[in-house]
Image (cartoon, rainbow, N blue to C red):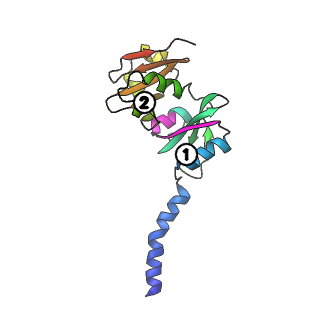
Amino acid sequence: MKKLILFLVWLMLFPCLACQLVFRDFQDENLERMSLEDFNFSTYATFKIIDHDTALSLTGNAYQNSGIILGMKENVYQMVFVPRRVREDPFIITDAPYYNLEEIYDVLANYVENPIFLQDYGGLSLSVRPYENYDDDAKARFNHPLFFIVTTDNNRFYCQYEGEKLLVYDDQQKEIYSSKPS
């Protein structure tokens, strides 16, 4: 009887343990260590899960439930793509679009009623899906289809770059900010 119970417990635990061997467990401490030690980032900013369309745009492959580490290396913001499956190695996105998280959050401070939403990157998401909603003239200005989307209690801001010039749009796709070219 004990052997049967032990066998049943093992049968219930095996799938759970096997998942850890197949899928990555996205923990901030591990991702920060990976960015600093394995990819020589000077600063780890955040990690964001991305959809398959965004993964396809950034890597050429439609990965499911994977993510992006955002951080700085040699004073330039860069991205590390982290596949969900353990057997696939993370890698730096060599053709990553230009972005500057500090600039985005500094600018948005002028548009947000409650600055608590800008204290960390919890309201930040990355996606290429909003790109399709813009007209051809706007698309021609963008460096890349990737949008940096910041969500607060009352607003959603869509941030994009034209060269190194920050463009910020509201929910109605109206441009509400454009930085001066560098």
Residue 61 higher or lower than 95, as above or below: below
Locate the C terminus by quadrant: top right
Residue in the image at 35% along x and 26% along y: 113
Question: Taking the image as drawn, is residue 63 in sight?
Answer: no
Query: Pointer 2: residues within 10 angstroms few (<14), some, or many (20+)?
Result: many
Disc 2 element: strand
- Residue 9: x and y in percent read 45, 75
- Residue 146: x and y in percent read 48, 28
Q: Residue furthest bottom?
A: 1
Highlighted magenta segment, given as a residue range: 42-56
In the picture, measured across the screen, residue 174 lies left or right of residue 51, that is left
Residue 168 higher or lower than 101, as above or below: above
Question: Taking the image as drawn, is residue 43 in sight?
Answer: yes
Q: Earlier in the sequence, mark 1 or mark 2?
A: 1
Q: Residue furthest top?
A: 180
Type of residue at label 1? Answer: Pro
Query: Pointer 1: residues within 10 angstroms few (<14), some, or many (20+)?
Result: many
Taking depth in this image into account, of 5 and 115 the one nearest to the observer is: 115
Taking depth in this image into account, of 90 and 169 the one nearest to the observer is: 169
Residue in the image at 63% along x and 27% along y: 76
| Label pair 1/2, CB-CB below 8 angstroms | no
Type of residue at label 2? Answer: Ile
Mark 2 highlights which residue? Answer: 149
- Residue 19: x and y in percent read 50, 59
- Residue 110: x and y in percent read 41, 21
Residue in the image at 43% along x and 24% along y: 108
Mark 1 highlights which residue? Answer: 83
Residue 108 higher or lower than 5, as above or below: above
Magenta stretch containing residue 55, yes or no?
yes
Residue 127 higher or lower than 25, as above or below: above
In the picture, measured across the screen, residue 153 lies left or right of residue 18, that is left
